[in-house]
Amino acid sequence: MSNIIDTVSWLAPDGSVHFQWTEQTLPAGGKLRIIDQRRLPEKLAYLDIDSVADACEAIQTLAVRGAPAIGCAAALALAAAGGKIETENTEEFLRRMRKNSGQLRASRPTAVNLSWALDRCMDRLEKSPHLPVQELKKELLKEALGILEEDIALCDRIGENGAALLRDGMGILTHCNAGALAAGGCGTALAPVYAAMRKGMRIKVYADETRPLLQGSRLTAWELQRAGADVTVLCDNMAAQLMREGRIQAVIVGADRIAANGDTANKIGTYGTALLAYCHHIPFYVAAPYSTFDLSLKDGSEIPIEQRDPHEVTEFSGKRIAPTGVKVCNPAFDVTPQELIRAFITDRGIIRPPFTNAENRI
Ligand code: MRU
């Protein structure tokens, strides 16, 4: 008989959850259950993961995606895979865990939350080489569940801090999905919206559809609609017109990695949206937990940008929409220069420019 540990992330009104950890026997036999986002919005289906290979595939194919979510998923998958290693030799266990962690780390390059979460798990193991393997497995699971629990709290704090910037009746534009489907908790860019809704504010959310993989229309619209929010989907090329019509009072997006000077990598198209907001004198906010800041990078030019399969651009729902053999570019992310960002909404408060001042750093 399996039992489900009471550590789940965001609980939708109908009881569906994003992350679940299921255990048969402690500490081995655990597995991670996630929503399979590739199938949304058509079907709410779940995916069980208990190996590094399954986790890498889920991360690469965007069954689980969004910076904080892939960090949580990788940590829990590492714990699941670790639980299955059959050895009593600590050195052998650590060697195999380093390999597992390396494979997970390589699954996607841009979101720093992935390596941040894996480093946390591996540090905990490496600091306790005197423990027997069974104890190390328990330590690893505690760390992974701790990362998920912490993310839930970080999202709530981002929500509270960001809601203070919102007013009743505002129109908010967002790009990609930085909501509950992208995190362990209720999200980053959407957290202030959820918090404002709880305070009784009427917020109108405009969701860029976010080509090529449509995270905005498939995922943001799906989760906001289920939460009872007022959400409108638009194609990416419509935002400028809506801004000119005065329908958007703020833009809030998430982030995959933020360099020390404030340059921010997020879903491709974010940079263009920031430029549009700048031209229309609309504040452009980036919402992110401290785990998304990478102060080891001087500026955005050092952020690795994932290049994805050309088929994501040349095919739509399995049908060709560009001539065979045409050249394609498909960067998954772009970098918004810090000067276009009005403020960062973080779990630790609002960070305003100049972002390079020591006291303004995360
Ligand atoms: O390719 P994706 O869907 O993983 O891209 C996700 C984003 O760009 C999000 O905006 C970002 O990870 C922040 S999620 C809270």
Image (tube, rainbow, N blue to C red):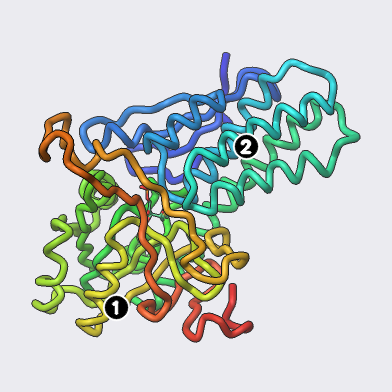
In this orientation, does residue 226 appear? no
63 sits to left or right of 221: right
**212 lies above or below 190:** above
User: Furthest residue to the right?
Assistant: 130
Question: Label 2 sits on what residue type?
Answer: Gly
Secondary structure of residue under mark 1: loop
Label 1 sits on what residue type?
Arg
Q: Which residue is mark 1?
A: 167
Q: Tag count in the figure?
A: 2
Side of 195 relative to 22 (left or right): left
Q: What residue is shown with label 2?
A: 102
- Residue nearer the viewer, 53 or 230: 53
Secondary structure beneath disc 2? helix
Q: Residue at x 49, y 47 (%)?
A: 109
Relative to residue 169, is residue 234 depicted above or below? above
Which residue is pictured at 56% across the width and 81% down the height? 356
Graded by Cα atoms within 10 Å as few (under 14), some (14 to 19) or many (20 or more), the crowding at tag 2 reads some
